[in-house]
Image: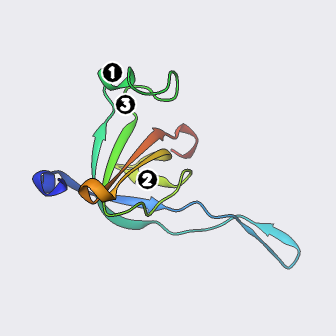
């Protein structure tokens, strides 16, 4: 399915959410470096909002399509064009079409 939209693939920086750790008795936040991944990024439209849980998303939040089984978790951050989106919902379509849909909300705190 994603082969049809191969021209729409973009480089997305992914920062996986990991917990910090204690170092010498001091709590250190995780300092994960972003990894570049190829995905399709499409904004959520007002028409699609009717099919999503009320208030969970707004127009301008994003859908990301990734080839293969789910590789990321809720809380992971996707960065595109300097804008950060936090993954909230995942739809596994690896059996039907070998792709995964990530619904992500814009993260205004990490801009």
Q: Nearer the viewer, residue 111 or 34?
A: 34
- Label 1 near label 3: C-beta < 8 Å? no
Identify the element where label 1 is drawn: helix
Residue at the farthest bottom position:
24
Identify the element where label 3 is drawn: loop
The circle drawn on residue 46 is 1
Q: Badge 1: few (under 14), some or many (20 or more) residues near its Cα, within 10 Å?
A: few
Q: Badge 3: few (under 14), some or many (20 or more) residues near its Cα, within 10 Å?
A: some
Disc 3 target residue: 60
Q: Badge 2: few (under 14), some or many (20 or more) residues near its Cα, within 10 Å?
A: many
Residue found 47% across the figure and 38% down from its top: 105
- Distance between mark 3 and mark 1 Cα atoms: 9 Å
Q: Tell us which disc is closer to us: 2 or 1.
A: 1
Residue at the farthest front position:
95
Q: Which numbered disc flags the more N-terminal residue, 2 or 1? A: 1
Residue found 86% across the figure and 79% down from its top: 24
Q: Which numbered disc flags the more N-terminal residue, 3 or 1? A: 1
Q: Which numbered disc flags the more N-terminal residue, 2 or 3? A: 3
- The image shows residue 76, relative to residue 107, as above or below, that is below
Disc 2 target residue: 78
- The image shows residue 96, relative to residue 35, as above or below, that is above
Q: Position of residue 23 (x, y in %)?
A: 80, 77
Q: Nearer the viewer, residue 76 or 71?
A: 71
């Amino acid at each position: 399915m994603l082969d049809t939209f191969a021209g729409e693939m973009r480089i997305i920086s992914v920062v996986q959410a990991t917990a910090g750790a204690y170092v010498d008795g001091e709590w250190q936040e995780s300092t994960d470096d972003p990894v570049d991944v190829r995905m399709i990024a499409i904004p959520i439209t007002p028409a699609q909002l009717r099919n999503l849980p009320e208030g969970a998303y707004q127009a301008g939040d994003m859908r990301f399509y990734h080839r293969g089984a789910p590789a990321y978790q809720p809380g992971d951050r996707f960065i595109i064009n300097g804008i950060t989106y936090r993954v909230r919902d995942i739809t596994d379509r690896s059996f039907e079409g070998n792709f995964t849909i990530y619904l992500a909300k814009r993260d205004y705190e990490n801009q």
